[in-house]
Image: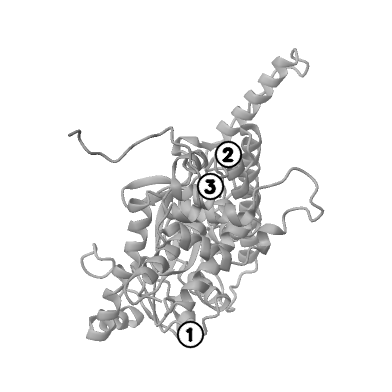
Amino acid sequence: MPQNFIECDRDQVLLMAPSLRDWLPEDHLAWFVLDAAEQMDLSGFYGAYRLDGHGRPAHEPAMMVALLLYAYARGQRSSRVIERECVEDIAYRVIAANRVPDHTTVARFRQRHEAALAGLFGDVLEMCAQAGLAKVGLIAIDGTKVQANASRDSNRDYEQIAREVLEEADAVDREEDERYGDARGDELPPHLSTEQGRRGWLRDAKRRLDEKRAEQAAPIPRSRPARLKEAKRRLDEELDVECAANAAYEAYRARGVDKDGRRFGRPPKPYQPSEVPTGKINVVDPDSRNIKAPRGYLQGYNAQAVTNEQQIVIAAEISADSPDFGHLEPMVCAAQAELERAGVADTPEVVVADAGYWHQAQMETVIDRGMQVLIPPDALKRRGARPGWDGGAYAFMRRVLETETGGGLYRKRQGMIEPVFADTKFNRRIDRFQRRGRSACRSEWRLITATHNLLKLFRHQMAPGGA
């Protein structure tokens, strides 16, 4: 008697047309993503296309949105990998309805619908709220450093940028038979230091410039020559801001009295801004910064998030600042705005954050909004109090955190937000941005956190007793 095996005939022709519904089990993530995409407001995507139907037909935006949501949830962001998976992976084929959008189409869709993709965060948060996962009695704020799509070796100072711009112009000139003559170089004077009293004015001016750039969020040019010119323009702009701030400070000191009517003591040390910009800027992603991370420095962004006790991200923003100092109030405001858009009427009661967020003025503002703030004045690695950080609000906060209630609430912080970053960076392998520029990286970060919430919602509904 011959051996008995199930027949394996790869040349067998299907007698009936296959149904995509038979390709995946009913509880597969792909079906959940498709159902979620149907509930989202995708008018921002459809509004970017012509209404008369002229031109080459585009892929259905709803399909492309579902495809990106599923890919990001699986930790796959490469447009070439997504294209390949639409051929090789059954779940991708189901979502794409057996269509295969090429990698250029996927990349351009992300670029074209940057703002709309960022808006998906609110749609997912609204679904989480409807499932009862957006409770905000206690919220945690923290940031994680994410590598930019740029290298630290691409940081250049003004002299290097000017030299490359001139070399680029020289190369073009040689290609045109040297019609424009030889290139010229510039000599840079030595850098000059500033004194402490003046430094605050200059720091505030640079902060306002950074906020202005964040509001504008201009896209990063694609060509290197254009990026070099943009980097040079930004350094020139920073020098102009420094000169204006210095002139304002000189005029302020020339009046002889401060804003409280008291006379100044000794006159300020003489200071003259440099004739050319100082500092460095990255010529690949000028918006990114060389920021300090737990394991050294990296070229990237400070990705901020606000989570609740269910580890649902209720606000996600990015910053180019290395420290978390100064981000407490903006993130609380962002969380309240996101909750309002999601239809959540509850207001956070307690806000917890680590010592890097200690900003007394912002803490008082948050408390005035009706929320309690729990932030230790001292980092865990520090032995004893910081020099000068004694008495007043510092001592009061230490006493609060030593109580059973205050300490118990603060100890929840790590379990509320650290696993979100761990799952994102290690489980889904999303530890660097693929796009360049503040606006593009913000859109990507919000899409990353939106898919984190989507996965939490999927597991909640698939769990026994889930909605």
* Residue to which mark 1 is pinned: 346
Q: Secondary structure at mark 3?
A: loop
Which residue is pictured at 52% across the width and 65% down the height?
Answer: 36
The extreme left residue here reads 1
Which residue is pictured at 36% across the width and 73% down the height?
Answer: 310
Which residue is pictured at 79% across the width and 56% down the height?
Answer: 51
Q: Secondary structure at mark 1?
A: loop
Residue 143: horizontal and vertical position, in percent?
41, 61
Residue 217: horizontal and vertical position, in percent?
63, 54
Q: Quadrant of the C terminus?
A: bottom left
Question: Mark 1 or 2 closer to N-term?
Answer: 2
Type of the residue with mark 3: Ala
Q: Secondary structure at mark 2?
A: loop
Type of the residue with mark 1: Asp
Q: Residue 210 versus residue 462: which sits nearer the camera?
A: 462
Instruction: Say if 449 sits above or below 277 in the image.
Output: below
Type of the residue with mark 2: Asp
Distance from label 1 to label 3 (Cα)?
51 Å
